[in-house]
Image (tube, grey):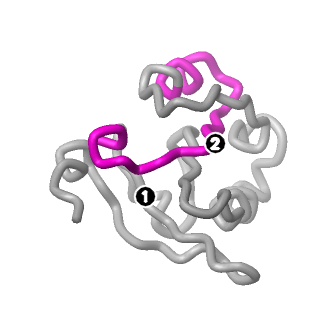
Amino acid sequence: VFRTRGFPVSRVRASEFCRVRTTAEQVAFGPPVETTPELTFFLYDEADRCATAYGLLAEPPPAGTNTALFSHAGFACPVLDALDSAEAAVFKPDPPGPALFIRRLVYSDWPGLP
């Protein structure tokens, strides 16, 4: 859907775990998958899991592009804690504030986006 609709992705970041990296690679957005320790929260900084996640979501991508983040379940923070497997949350960076939550999407929602 991203390719067909022309949604450009300039950066793909994933947890260090093989299953998450493999999923990110199989989605094949285009850019190489970057291993991002900050997305492997429970190994390094569980206490700051939500703050770190929202910090990554707030980083603006290059103009006219999107960033894809792949991580793990188990969040106990708003929006992210409600995601099911294979579900996505769409956020819009809003510097200097936090990212703005736009909506949750299951796989079948993507083709119907405006």
Q: Residue at x 70, y 57 (%)?
A: 56
Q: Residue at x 49, y 58 (%)?
A: 80
Provide the residue span drawn in magenta: 1-24
Q: Seen in the image, is 52 located left or right of residue 91? A: right
User: Is the C-beta separation of discs 1 and 2 under 8 Å?
Assistant: no
Q: Amino acid at mark 1?
A: Ala
User: Residue 42: horizontal and vertical position, in percent?
Assistant: 72, 40
How many numbered marks, from 0 up?
2
Of the image marks 1 and 2, the number of the one nearer the N terminus: 2
Residue that carries the numbered disc 2 in the rendered image: 11
As drawn, the label of residue 89 is 1
Q: Residue at x 75, y 58 (%)?
A: 52
- Crowd band around label 1 with a 10 angstrom C-alpha radius: few (<14), some (14–19), many (20+): some
Nearest the viewer among 39 and 91 is 91
Q: Is residue 109 magenta?
A: no
Q: Is residue 93 above or below residue 3?
A: below
Q: Amino acid at mark 2?
A: Arg
Q: Is residue 110 above or below residue 104?
A: above
Nearest the viewer among 38 and 31 is 31
As drawn, the label of residue 71 is none
User: Residue 29: horizontal and vertical position, in percent?
Assistant: 48, 33
User: Residue 106: horizontal and vertical position, in percent?
Assistant: 26, 49
